[in-house]
Image (tube, helix red, strand yellow):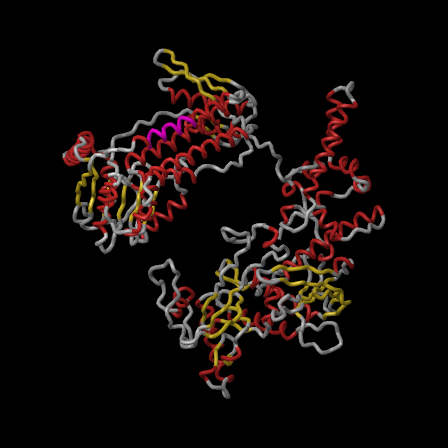
Amino acid sequence: MDEFVPSAKETCKFYDPIVFSNTELKAKLEFSWSKFDAALAELKLSLPSQYKDTDDMYKKLRKRLSNCYAKILCCLENLGIICAYEAVKICLENVPNDKDENEILRTSSLQHRYFLEEALSIVQESMPQDCESLFDVGYDSSAILSMGHISSKLQVLLEIFQFLRNATQVRCLIFVERIITAKVIERVMKKMTWFSHFTLAYLTGTNTSVDALTPKAQKETLGSFLSGKVNLLFATDVVEEGIDVPHCSSVIRFDLPKTVRSYVQSRGRARQTESQYILMLERGNKKQREQMFDIIRSEYSMTDTAIKRDPDDSVVKPCLVKETKTYYVEATGASVTADSSVSVLTKYCEMLPGDRFFSPKPIFQYILSGELYQCKLTLPPNAAFQTIVGPECRSSQLSRQLVCLDACKKLHQIGALNDHLLPFNEKPPRGDSDVQDRKLGAGTTKLKELHGTACISALSGSWGNDPNGEVYQVYKMNFPCNIKEVKYSSFILLLQSELDYDVGNVEVELFLVSKFVTSSVSHCGKVHLDSQQVAKAKIFQELFFNGLFGKLFIKSSGGRKFLLDTEKSLWEPSNMYLLLPLDPLDSSCEPYRVDWEAIESSVSVVEFLKKNAWLSNEKSEAKRKNSLVDRTASFVEDLDQTDLIHFANISISRSKITDMVVVAIHTGRIYSVLNAVVNTSAESPFEVDSEATVAPFSSFADYFHKKYGIVLVYPGQPLLLLKQSHNAYNLLVDFKKEGISCGPKSKDSTMVVQKPLNNVHMPPELLVCFDIRLDILKSFYLLPSLMHRLESLMLASQLRKEISSHSGDLHISSSLILEALTTLRCNESFSMERLELLGDSVLKLLVIQPSINWELINSCRVTYGMAHLIHADGLLLGSFPCGFVLVNTGLKLHKCLWTRSF
């Protein structure tokens, strides 16, 4: 075994017995703990105990206080006063916030915090004034020890680390018994400048302790140690087994192992050749010495037994399997065994109604009759039945399982469990016709599940297929920016329906990170487009909206497919409109002129991608090379070859490529060109992430060849620096003022932090050029926010028309109606949803009034009458003048809420 798995060299390091001299400090801490523990006990006695959860809560709080005191005392006695000071700070960081609704819990948590703050002050008073300065000078453990700052045990550990400074590669595991020990030593060592060349971390299990790490943090820390980013890892027994660290050079048992398994497993973590396994023993401690002798003796005994084992003992003997009691349901084939019946019954109890003071769960009581056990099961009061007694068994565990099996059988027979032996779900299925017709009361939170949505009639249609063309209503969109140098292209919105004046003529402010745009929409009459113009406009819109905010390449059964190369329509009848760019250099008297050159360019790019998009190696390589060779020979006769940049569809002078809009043939992503990077080519080293240690590809050409199978024709061309496209952001709200979480924020400020620019480098021959201005591309990021606001105004106007058809003209603006319908979940800067407080007050008045006026009427009739009165339509009728109109018109009021966020 030693030839393949080298064993670690075992050594022992002895430290002097720990002598604690500062008894006065210990007495002060004990007095402080006793004082606050007594305060918690008095607080409990001053209040009546009505619920069992209250007692459990107080026990948990007192235990938490005692645990913190024990941690501080442990660090003080075993590590020294410096570590005790850090332990108090760690405990103080883990105290929960005092924001609980329960006054008792909030007061108790404050007592816990006050104790730790007082303990911190007590320890700080006992520390020397120059304690912190000791971390910044040269290493002298004996001087620190003599001053009483650290214990002799910690001093020996620091001397071991001092010896490891000369090693070239250090990966050392330090096993400790308590989580607080790992956290405290890691913090103290990070402050010591003479160990600054080491990278430290700690790793603990994911138990219920407040000091425990999350699974994600565990994985990240362990990965850093395995890759060598962490040199010293303080860990509990969580990493004694199950991990492989081939380059672990040292394992230190700061706290001794307690079992043979722990001893063998922790020693096995030292896998590197000539690795060390160091045991730290207290000098003259007979108990520790005998403990280690017993462990080593047991290991030798186990090894000797394994070597001398009889070979015949390994023969597999037939296993006698006892018949398991099972309950079957013939209708579905579902079954439950004695083993699984406990979990089924627990799940049934969890489905029963409960609250914060009552958690429904089964209660088991065992009756001993001679040598046999009998289990009595008591279910919660709201269960289908309350008690059942199981059969007699030889063990308490089996009696518990069998009584649960009998309970599951009885629950199924009386209908509490369905034929799949699962608890019945009280909620009706979504497709139930009763749900569709049921009228719901006010205050429901199940809008998504129970209610439909209204379509915008102004955007609905089936146009686009008429060979004679279509006539559209034109709405011009302008995007002037507060910074005059920043330009955005104007667009027009084409609809078949004419919008109301207060919808089609609006101004909307759009807030960007460092600027804002006051967009405006105005009606400009009608326009006729022939069938070819409509088809080209639809291709333009499909290309940019899918290329910027979606995907142009999709997966299909045979690999990848170009989204626009399909016979299936991408348009929905409920969302039909066109957005077209305008020519900024229009000198005519017309209010607008569509930039058909940009649209034609987009159509030609789509045709090029249909033929040359990189869908697979076999289909695309020959086509791409042929298009490059045929194009280049006829295009560059009069130009200097060194000044040309060869793109996938055209060759252009280097001086004209800045601010060009391009699309990649292998990903379908749209970029804008910043510049050509000097002294670079496809043969340049591939960019590596800061966290990666070795580059996965030798060059850009190697990357495209290995990942996509592309062999570059012009590898010597300079790489282009490209600005990536990004998702559409909500620009309707100024998050810097509203305080709504929209992105990363600085720690001490509510200002939104601008994300760093993420640019990429790419060979030009993989990019297809558009003849489109950059300001058109920039306007595409403004259109989603503006259209979101227009759609909401269209729905508000649509609701106004429905009401007006029954009650006459309503002189209420669409924006005011939208404000009344908008919910808080929309993240808008306006909403009247908080007026529900007024509605709640009216509701309480309507509920109380009948019980006062109808004292002599039967209580059931009063309840029945109140239920009808509280109904949403009745509440509207009693609260608002227009409620009568709404109720009698039969409008679907649940569709009159704007709940969709951007």
| 813 on left or right of 206 | right
Residue at the front extreme?
129
Q: 803 or 529, which is in the foreground?
A: 803
234 up-or-down from 197: above or below: above
Q: Is residue 165 visible?
A: yes
| 673 on left or right of 495 | left
| 187 on left or right of 806 | left
**Residue 510 figure quarter:** bottom right
Tell me the magenta residue range.
25-35
Tell me residue 437's x, y (percent). 71, 38
Residue under the image location 41 percent in, 64 percent down? 707
* Secondary structure mostly taken by the magenta-highlighted segment of the chain: helix
Residue under the image location 20 percent in, 38 percent down? 15
Tell me residue 720's x, y (percent). 47, 72
Residue at the top extreme?
370
623 up-or-down from 564: above or below: below
| 608 on left or right of 848 | left
